[in-house]
Amino acid sequence: MLLYGIAAVAVLWWFLINFAHANPATLARFFKVTGGVVALGLAGLLAVRGRIDMALLIGGFGAWLLGWNRLAFSSLDGRSQRASGRTSRVRSQLIEMTLDHDTGGMDGSVLTGASEGQRLGSLDEARLRDLLAECHASDPEGVRLLEAYLDRRFPHWREHAKTEDQPQADVPSPSAAMTLEEAYQILDLHPGASSVEIQQAHRTLMKKLHPDQGGSTYLAARANQAKDVLLKRGHR
């Protein structure tokens, strides 16, 4: 017992000498790590002796001290974040449109023409109408994409737009052939995605394109076409 007492005093003296001026946060971190290691060691010893219930309890406490639970939750959160942040891209001759799956927000860029290189979000309503006129002249698909964008950003633009000489585009089912690359971009999938992933991505996107969410029938038709193209790919 005397030897144990001397050892305890020696350990206490060593701590006082080495940690007297240490940062409190560093000390707390040290004791948590030490306590976690000791708790896990004790849990292992109890498990060997058949005390599984106590081993689980003390082992869980040790894991908490070591922060393993936070690491696990961070990993799960990281996977959740990777699953979010998806976007769909639809390209026409003059513009490329993007749709954020999380927020339903739409934006895009001008590929050519008077506003080449500019983001749609940087253009005011008047300049977007000028871009729409360019699309009417040479880019029917761009007309539908830009009208969908205007509907979301300026809900009453049609009431004020003087487009009597420019017939409004109907909302058709896309008839142009869609490539696999375009289909993957629309559903934000990687080549080789499974049929389950395709169906899930399609359902998620269609929720954002629902009329109650300010959706676009044309974009919904493009999403349906993309799903069909990718599903048929697996039967070739």
Image: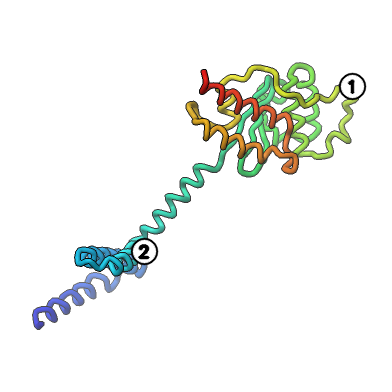
Given the image, on which type of amino acid does mark 2 rest? Trp
Asked if residue 43 lies left or right of residue 152, the reply is left
For residue 140, side relative to residue 201 (left or right): right
Q: Is residue 54 above or below residue 100?
A: below
Task: Tell me whether circle 2 and circle 1 mark residues in contact (CB < 8 Å).
Answer: no
Name above or below for residue 138 compared with residue 160.
Answer: above
Image point (76%, 21%), residue name? 135
Going from N to C along the chain, the mark reached first, 2 or 1, is 2
Image position, residue 233 (x, y; %) = 53, 21
Colouring method of the image: rainbow
* Residue drawn at x 70%, y 35% as measured from the top left: 122
Where residue 216 appears, as percent x and y from the top left, is 73, 34
The residue under the point 31% across, 65% down is 56
Residue 74 left/right relative to 124? left
- Residue toward you, 219 or 124: 219
Quarter residue 42 falls in: bottom left
Q: Position of residue 91 (x, y in %)?
A: 65, 24
Q: CA distance from mark 2 to mark 1?
A: 70 Å
- For mark 1, what is the residue? 165
Residue 30 visible in this rendered orientation of the protein: no
Q: Report helix, strand or loop for mark 1.
A: loop
Q: Amino acid at mark 1?
A: Asp
Residue picked out by circle 2? 64
Badge 2: few (under 14), some or many (20 or more) residues near its Cα, within 10 Å?
Answer: some
Quadrant in the rendering for residue 87: top right
Quadrant of the rendered structure where residue 144 is? top right
In the image, what residue occupies the spot 80% across and 23% down? 133
Vertical placement of residue 111 versus 87, above or below: above
Quadrant for the N terminus, please.
bottom left
